[in-house]
Image: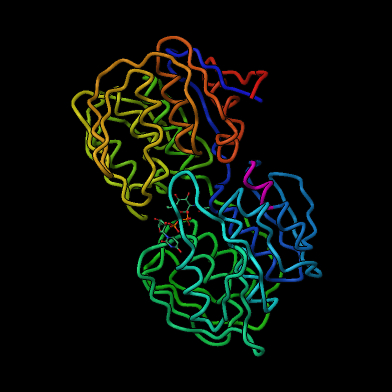
Amino acid sequence: MHKIRILGGQPLAGDITISGAKNAALPLLCVSLLTDQPMIFKNVPNLADIRTLLELLDQHGVSINDNLPDLTLCTHTLKSNTAPYEIVRRMRASFLVLGPLLGRHGSGIVSLPGGCAIGTRPVDLHLMGLEKLGASIQLESGYVHATAPSNGLRGADISMPMISVGATENVMLAAVLAKGTTRIINAAREPEIIDLAKCLNAMGARVEHAGTDTIIIEGVDTLHGATHTVQPDRIETGTYAMAAAITRGEVTLNETSLDLIPTVVSVLEQAGMIFTPTENGFKAKAGNLKGIDIMTEPFPGFSTDLQAQFMALMTLATGASMITETIFENRFMHVPELCRMGANITVHGSSALVRCGTPLKGAPVMATDIRASISLVMAGLAAQGETMIDRIYHLDRGYETVEDKLRNCGAHIERIAVSGD
Ligand code: UD1
């Protein structure tokens, strides 16, 4: 097994190229189940989560030509309509194969994903949406058995009682081949939803108003192959911008855009960060950082996927910062780890009070989920002395070549093999 060792205190300086977005790529790759023609994807990040989804698609019978960041997928014949527990439990986004299996192949048997470290994360909204499209759904031995009527799914008005990215995507993936019109009301508005709609439309689908709270889909009979470039990763973008600031360095982020993270930029500017657009991205650095309060919200609000990184940054600001998590019920697992490094943070229910200004000191810490692990890397970069991060497989799920990207900016970071557990 491996750990990450960081010797902190070096301001980051240099360029980082942002990879394709993991959370856009995952639903996009599921699109390949909707056509028997080749789908060509560009700018796909080489991440553990992408490999997990490819493993799942492979067992469904999708042929894969893997030349990452380019990827060609083709589903000539569906080999299996079952997504097994062994794969789905590793990554919740695997549940997104259900929409296309139902929409094009008439049925799907997909394992329930189960809970995950950041919360219970049910799939009731996915199932409610698919039922509204006419699917009959049964739960048996931990699996969802979903079947479309013999004449296929039919469009419907689906009003989401709460905003869910995954449920919006699953319904879109099913509704593109349903008969008639589907309206998803209270849909998620994340940029990844817009990327998915663009790809579906390039295949001949008719998806309108993606990026607003009401998506309208006119079903079509068939979809054809297409080429699609995955959008830049906005979470990676926000993460490295904050990494520059926490080390009091300056980093130029390439192949991305400030427009991808408008709320985050506005919050970080209020906290004292300085952004300058460039031709191909932007420069990010810290000014005089001060504590400010944030609350995570669905897009366009402050992303829950940047909450842990923001908390690490706030430990070094002046004043105090109240950080409220409204999306997931258990997303403060980085708090005790940051406290091991000297941070002064107390949690009250869904809010964490960061008393800013305590210098961080290196310590052995443990990663608990993707975003918690990168917040510990950031804290390690800013801390005096050595930080050793355990359970870094979480990091590999979401951050492509993280050590190389940071080392190119002067960080002392290495992956070391350790014996034991
Ligand atoms: C996606 C992102 C994840 C991000 C999250 C919120 C991917 C692969 N993952 O996850 O990185 O943190 O959006 O921005 O894109 N919920 C229900 N019932 C459901 C579905 C969701 O109650 O059927 C709840 C969840 O428990 C959570 C909230 O809705 O409290 C939002 O979750 P959702 O937007 O669905 O997150 P994911 O799509 O799983």
Above or below: residue 388 compared with residue 201: above
Query: Which of the pair 99/120 is nearer the observer?
Result: 120
Question: Residue 402 occupies which quadrant of the picture?
Answer: top right
Name the residue furthest front.
141
Q: Is residue 291 magenta?
A: no
The x, y position of residue 75, in whole percent, is 77, 66
Classify 250 as above or below 372. above
Q: Is residue 62 left or right of residue 258?
A: right
Q: Is residue 367 visible?
A: yes
- Residue 343's place in the image compared with 172, above or below, is above
Residue sitting at the far top: 385
> Which residue is at a point 38% across and 18% down the rendered structure image?
341
- Residue 151, image x, y percentages: 65, 90
Seen at 76% across and 64% down, the residue is 38
Q: Residue at x 49, y 12 (%)?
A: 7
Q: Residue furthest bottom?
A: 151
Q: In terms of secondary structure, what is the magenta stretch mainly? A: helix
The C terminus: image quadrant: top right
Vertical order, 368 against 410 (above or below): below
Position of residue 168 measured from the top left corner of the image (x, y, whole percent): 47, 66
Q: Per the image, is 49 magenta?
A: yes
Q: Tell me which segment is drawn in magenta.
A: 48-53
Q: Position of residue 10 (x, y in %)?
A: 45, 13
Is residue 201 in sight in this rendering?
A: no
Image quadrant of residue 310?
A: top left
Q: Quadrant of ligand 1?
A: bottom left
Which quarter of the figure is the N terminus placed in? top right
